[in-house]
Image (cartoon, grey):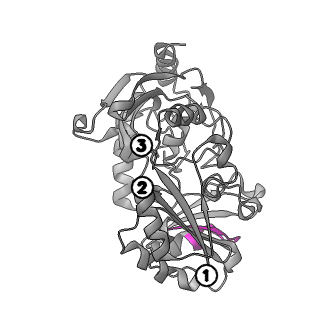
Amino acid sequence: MEYQDLSEIIKQSYKNGTPLRITGSQTKNFYGAALHGEKLSVLDYSGIVDYEPSELVLTVKAGTPLREIEELLRSRGQMLAFEPPHYGENATLGGSLACGFSGPRRPFADSAGSYTLGVKICDGRGRILSYGGRVMKNVAGYDVSRIMTGSMGTLGVLLEISLKVLPLPDCELTLKKQMGLSETAEFFSAIARKPFPLSGAAWVDGAVYVRLSGNERAVAKASRTIGYDEKNIHGHAPADRMSDFWYHLKEHTLPFFSSDENLWRLSLSQTWPFSSDRVSESDIILDWMGALRWIRDPVDPEKIFSEAENAGGHAVLFRRRPEMMNSSDYFMKLGPEALKIHRRIKKIFDPGGILNPGRMHREF
């Protein structure tokens, strides 16, 4: 199928005012409001468009499976630096970028949007548009590549994506230390002030995990300074990942994530208190040096949103209990100015409001 075929479908839907639900491998259907409208699949738009290992640049069609991309990069000693979670065997790059997901490496290597050099999209009028390029200096004006990252298909259908990739580190080592939740803030703060080659820092079930990535000498020196109860050297081959703590953390296959309780994703300051009177330590996981909190909490969404706002952070009802699947209270409400900006951008890219309507916010 050619891009023009998809363009014609969207043009007709825009003319008729027909809502469209953009789908791929459907590994992230749990995230955000339920999709409705006529199905528009992008799975046929798959494949490598261009790859220049020496330039650290990769361009692929949005429906390309993440596993294929990662296997190709690994064969050339490279990787996606933002470590995107899959949440399913057939996850696509387009779906991951549309949701804006980044893994444990995020605070040390930056986000998915930071590595997106350019995109080709089909907007809500059926126009095929290209933004950015294959080098950073080509980005000008509105950084549309970053706007599309995390927009969940409400602004346009991703067709092609150009990414900057990075070399795999020479060595990776994970350190584990038993530690109470109350001690982690000071510990994370202490290691953050040092020139350690950090690529992961989390607290799970009474222990902190620290991942070091770099040359063997720097990793060994940092591990001696930090100290540990256990350590594990891990590689990058596909066979290794299933025993890798960081893989299970990013893919939500740790026992913590098997509960049917509401799962909240909170982005807060690293120095904000890690617990509250109503949440036990067994219901909390910290990632990103404490800036990302996964919390199992059955309370009313408005209370969590209010607490996050008071803390100057952000909260998302990441996964909902089965009886709440039709709830629309999953993202924090936008303030007046933010709502005004979002509406303006939505009108530019999807004036008919036909692309994934209501996926993120009730207003559009």
279 left or right of 157 in image: right
Q: CA distance from mark 2 to mark 1?
A: 27 Å
Query: Which x, y percent locates residue 183?
Result: 54, 85
User: Which residue is at a point 33% across and 39% down the rendered structure image?
Assistant: 144
Would you identify the image quadrant in which residue 336 lies? bottom left
Q: Amino acid at mark 2?
A: Asn
* Sequence-earlier tag: 2 or 1: 1
Residue designated by label 2: 215
> Does 224 appear in magenta?
no
Q: Amino acid at mark 1?
A: Met
Q: CA distance from mark 2 to mark 3?
A: 12 Å
Depth check, front residue: 260 or 342: 260
User: Which residue is at a point 61% across and 42% down the rendered structure image?
Assistant: 237
Circles 2 and 1, Cβ within 8 Å, touching? The answer is: no
Depth check, front residue: 215 or 177: 215
Would you identify the image quadrant in which residue 249 lies? bottom right
Query: Which x, y percent locates residue 283?
Result: 69, 73
Closer to the eye: label 2 or 3 = 2
Residue designated by label 3: 167
SS label for mark 3: strand
Query: Which x, y percent locates residue 330?
Result: 59, 57
Q: Residues within 10 Å of mark 1 (few under 14, many from 20)?
A: some
Residue designated by label 1: 179
Closer to the eye: label 1 or 3 = 3
Q: Amino acid at mark 3?
A: Pro
Q: CA distance from mark 1 to mark 3?
A: 33 Å
User: Which residue is at a point 52% across and 51% down the rendered structure image?
Assistant: 361
The quadrant of the picture occupied by the N terminus is: top right
- Reply above or below: 142 against 245: above
57 left or right of 185 in image: left
Residue 100 in view in this figure: yes
Give the magenta part as a residue range. 291-304
